[in-house]
Amino acid sequence: MLHTPKPHTGLRPSLLILVAVSAINPAGINIFIPSMASMEKVFNTDFATIQLTLSLYLAGVAVSQLLIGPLSDRFGRRPILLSGLSLFIVGSIVCSQATSIDMLIYGRLIQAFGGCAGIVLARAIVRDMYDREQAASMIGYVTMGMAVAPMVSPLVGGLLHEAYGWQASFHLLTVVTVVVVIWAWFALHETNPYIGRSSGAGALVRSYWILARVPAFWAYTLCAAMSAGLFFGFLGGAPYVSEHVLGLEPGEIGVYFLFVAGGYVIGNFLSGRFASRVGITRMIVTGLIAASSGVVIMTALFAFGLVHPLALYGPMLVIGVANGVALPSSVAGVVSVRPDLAGAASGLAGSLQVGLGALVSYLVAQAVTIGPMAGTVWPMIGVLAACAIAWAATVIWATATDKPG
């Protein structure tokens, strides 16, 4: 039985501050991507080892979300968010001072443990303030603004790498996050109406046990995970394919990543505009159709011998639109199955989503460098196709279990 929420005493945070705190984690992921292939020489290692700075980052995000969501249900969104972003600053400093690949990986893990607080808790905060259908629209608008970070950060990271070296990206992340923390201190008010209703490890386990018994939670969680798997599969192979197959420089990779993030911005705008009217199930189905079309187009272009950046990044624009259309609605479904456990739901679903992403990105990175198809784009395309097929299966499940809440 749901608790009756008590009104929170703070004011509603503006969407602008939610955009800012949400942008930290994707900026941390994307700003470093144009530098990855070149880092083989910097640290005298191979690409598969360099790729651990991405896949272990994602794994760290997955693990930390299991704690961040329930902690915010117990202690409030605001203190957990500020603590997480402060930890991200520490990790960014460690990365900027790294003298070995091991030190860089440790710094990336610290970044991951803190940075994911922004995106997890922004979703929970939106659900604190709005009902399910409205939450889908508002999450769409928040992520549309947030998508400026992954859209711009690869370009900025590539240009900084060419001008000042790879460390410059982490210096920039440090400064920007300090500014966001100061802003959040003054502008981000508590929204959790159920604050203090649970405590201890037992309450955390109970929260997850309750969610685990709700089929709709798993259906929407897997919808989000499989749709995001398309993006993470691309991240796992794109740096290698872009440099070694397509011959792009770090700055050029950053420019082409604008296609992916730009598509995501468009999709989020469409989600914000139509989700509350169309409904989350139709938005998810629309996203699936668009993503599958993107995979088919990419496969056809390379199959006909068009080895060109647009053959890779053009279809990824379509897939980016698809993610922007579907992901906010999937997340709204996740955090609406039990509104009193919105933080735990956001954390658990986000952990599974990013955990799958870490696995997918690692497998793609291995496949493009090792094995019979190494040095080609086909291992990455194969994984994207597999994610699209799995997504279709989860959409059928979500449609069957959909119960507006």
Image (cartoon, rainbow, N blue to C red):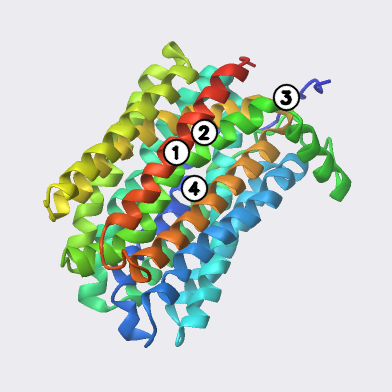
Q: Is residue 260 left or right of residue 280?
A: left
Please tell me whether residue 176 is drawn above or below residue 210 in the rendered image.
below
Q: Secondary structure at mark 3?
A: loop
- Circles 3 and 1: CB distance less than 8 Å? no
Mark 2 vs mark 4: give the one in front.
2
What residue is rendered at 59% in x and 17% in y?
400
Q: Please name the amino acid that badge 3 sits on.
A: Pro
Residue 404, given in percent of the width and then of the height, sits at 61, 14
- Circles 2 and 4: CB distance less than 8 Å? no
Q: Secondary structure at mark 4?
A: helix
Q: Please name the amino acid that badge 2 sits on.
A: Cys
- Circles 1 and 2: CB distance less than 8 Å? yes
- Circles 3 and 2: CB distance less than 8 Å? no
Residue 24, given in percent of the width and then of the height, sits at 46, 54
Question: Of 70 and 314, which appears nearest the observer?
Answer: 314
Quick check: can you spot residue 123? yes
Question: Of 190 and 368, which appears nearest the observer?
Answer: 368
Q: Which mark is residue 227?
A: 1
Q: Please name the amino acid that badge 4 sits on.
A: Val
Q: Please name the amino acid that badge 1 sits on.
A: Ser
Q: Secondary structure at mark 1?
A: helix
Q: Which mark is residue 7?
A: 3
Residue 153, given in percent of the width and then of the height, sits at 31, 57
Mark 3 vs mark 4: give the one in front.
4
Which numbered disc flags the more N-terminal residue, 3 or 2?
Answer: 3
Which numbered disc flags the more N-terminal residue, 3 or 1?
Answer: 3
For marks 2 and 4, give the CA distance: 24 Å
- Circles 3 and 4: CB distance less than 8 Å? no
Q: Which mark is residue 21?
A: 4
